[in-house]
Image (cartoon, grey):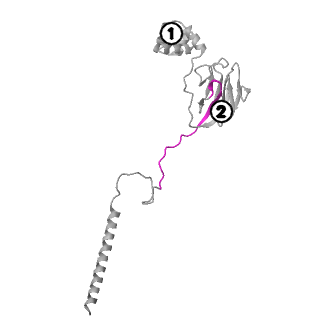
Amino acid sequence: MPVIGIVMIGVGVIAVVAYAFYLQKQQAEAEAARKKPAARGGARRTGGRAGGGTTGKVATTPAPAAKINWLVGIKGPVAGKNFHVGQRTVTIGRGAQNFIQVDDALCSRKHVQLKPRKGHLLVVDMSSENGTFINDAKVTEAKLMPGNKLTVGPATFEFRLAMKGVQDSTRDRKAAGKETQAETAAAPNLAVVMAALKDANGDVDVAAHKLGMDRNVVQTLAKMQQQ
């Protein structure tokens, strides 16, 4: 066999062996990379495939649920305010003890009561002097349906069955009222009231009964003493 033929065969064998070693090295590197633990850190994902981007769900803060039974002030001193009634039986009137206070002479001290029912509020007039109105019609006891307008003295509300993301005005500071202020000014000596409260162990109702005074006046005087 010519020498050149032998050389060509030798070169071919060397090339085959070198290629076999190359393939073996590539397989070993791939196996090592597959077994190597993923590096820590970086953005966390809730799912997805490697190399395919983030396909899992992104965690988000749940939106607040809607609350039921709202009175939205649309006229008078309550205009622009929202009152969350919820499932409570509440009253509206001139006195500060009401759930919603309308401090006006056209309102009775306890003017109207609202009772939550399925899909509406039951409106019960509390023998008010000037009456309670739903959609301009005077009522004694009636259903207040969503979208209906309730008028109590100078205040008009619209009933909404559900709302969310609005400010609740029921915690706004209430006025003492002109009657309570006048009674407070004419009250007995503060020391006498405080002594009655002390004898009653701080019970405002007991002290008010003993003094023959309105409990709101006694409570107001007690708060004045604490300030």
Identify the image quadrant of the N terminus.
bottom left
Q: Amino acid at mark 1?
A: Val
For mark 1, what is the residue? 193
Residue farthest to the right, as pictured: 137
Q: Position of residue 204 (x, y in %)?
A: 52, 15
Give the SS element for disc 2: strand
Which sits earlier in the primary sequence, circle 1 or circle 2? 2
Residue farthest to the bottom, as pictured: 1
The Cα atoms of the two marked residues, 1 and 2, are separated by 42 Å
Q: Position of residue 141 (x, y in %)?
A: 70, 27
Quarter location, residue 92: top right
Q: Position of residue 85 (x, y in %)?
A: 60, 31
Viewer-side label of 1, 2: 2
- 19 or 151, which lies in front? 19
The stretch of residues the image draws in magenta is 55-79
> Residue drawn 63% across and 24% down?
77
For mark 2, what is the residue? 159
Give the SS element for disc 1: helix
For disc 2, the neighbor class at 10 Å (few under 14, some 14 to 19, many from 20) is many
Q: Amino acid at mark 2?
A: Phe
- 121 or 1, which lies in front? 1
